[in-house]
Image: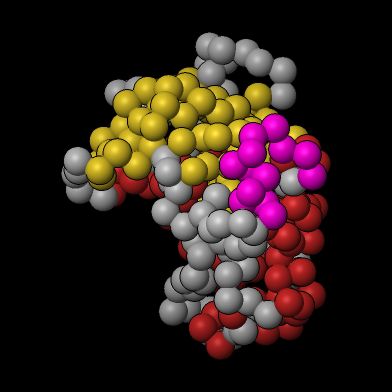
Amino acid sequence: IPLNHNAFSLTMNLPMERNGWGRKIQAEQVDFFYGAFHALKNVNLEVKEKQITALIGPSGCGKSTFLRTLNRMNDLIPGTRLTGSIFLDGKNIYAPDVNPVDLRQRVGMVFQRPNPFPMSIFENVAFGPKVLGIHRRSNLVEIVEKSLRGAALWEEVADHLGQEATGLSLGQQQRLCIARSLALEPEVLLLDEPTSGLDPISTAKVEQSLVELKARYTIVLVPHSIQQGARMADYAAFFLMGKLVEFGPGSKIFTNPADKRTEDYIMGRFG
């Protein structure tokens, strides 16, 4: 079967209510609260389609919180609250008629620590499609291979797909988690410091796979370092104390930022 969203029968019927050339996600006047704590303050940010947008800033600045608002992962935390709007292809993802489970199929997420399931490499990648009703072996084989190739892992594991995923190296486990997300054919990939704790070779492989994947997916990344952000970002957003300080092309943000606070952070004067 074709690897598309209709095959999974989980479209959200999101009409293009707000067209914008190259725009995939639009955050408008977003405030976010953990109980009484005001974590995000009036964030307005546009994510371009099929580009890598890096969210940078010191620890606790709100970048990971903002990342999780993009597929409503924060909904799983008791006592949280969001005001404002976040649009995906022009539809507010916080509208009452949007199913968060369907949303997370369109907007996949890879976390800081690899979390492979305690099953084989093949079954890890096939798990999501099976949940969505795909059980024919030939279809699953096609999905698994395509997803592992997309995550730059196929050549390393093709001959032992029956091996337990927990036996892979940390770098391989992280790429497996990327493949597991790709198996659901998302439109957007969110990554929260996906190379934190990985060795330089594994980090380079993950980075290369993401650069290749942006031809097909919109990617929003919290990099683990300024250097990684500078290497990868088509666009960059600098957060500080819950506020978006500056947003623009990565080439400008990392070499000639407009705001002194951004410059100070990029130069390592704080954070």
What residue is drawn where x is 54% and y is 19%? 90
What residue is drawn where x is 60% and y is 27%? 46
What residue is drawn where x is 20% and y is 48%? 78
The answer to whether 133 is drawn above or below residue 124 in the figure is above
Front residue (pair 183, 223): 223
Residue 99 visible (yes or no): no
Front residue (pair 56, 221): 56
Q: Quadrant of residue 227?
A: bottom right
53 within the magenta span:
no
256 within the magenta span:
yes
Q: Using residue 57 as the reference point, say whether residue 138 is left or right of it.
A: right
The answer to whether 27 is drawn above or below residue 136 in the figure is above
The answer to whether 137 is drawn above or below residue 260 in the figure is below
The answer to whether 236 is drawn above or below residue 93 in the figure is below
What residue is drawn where x is 66% and y is 16%? 20
Q: Using residue 191 as the reference point, say whether residue 21 is left or right of it.
A: right
Query: Residue 138 location in percent, x, y?
Result: 65, 61
Give the magenta range. 255-267
Front residue (pair 194, 168): 194
Q: Using residue 69 as the reference point, say whether residue 185 is left or right of it.
A: right
Residue 28 visible (yes or no): yes
Query: Residue 15 location in percent, x, y?
Result: 53, 16
Front residue (pair 187, 170): 170
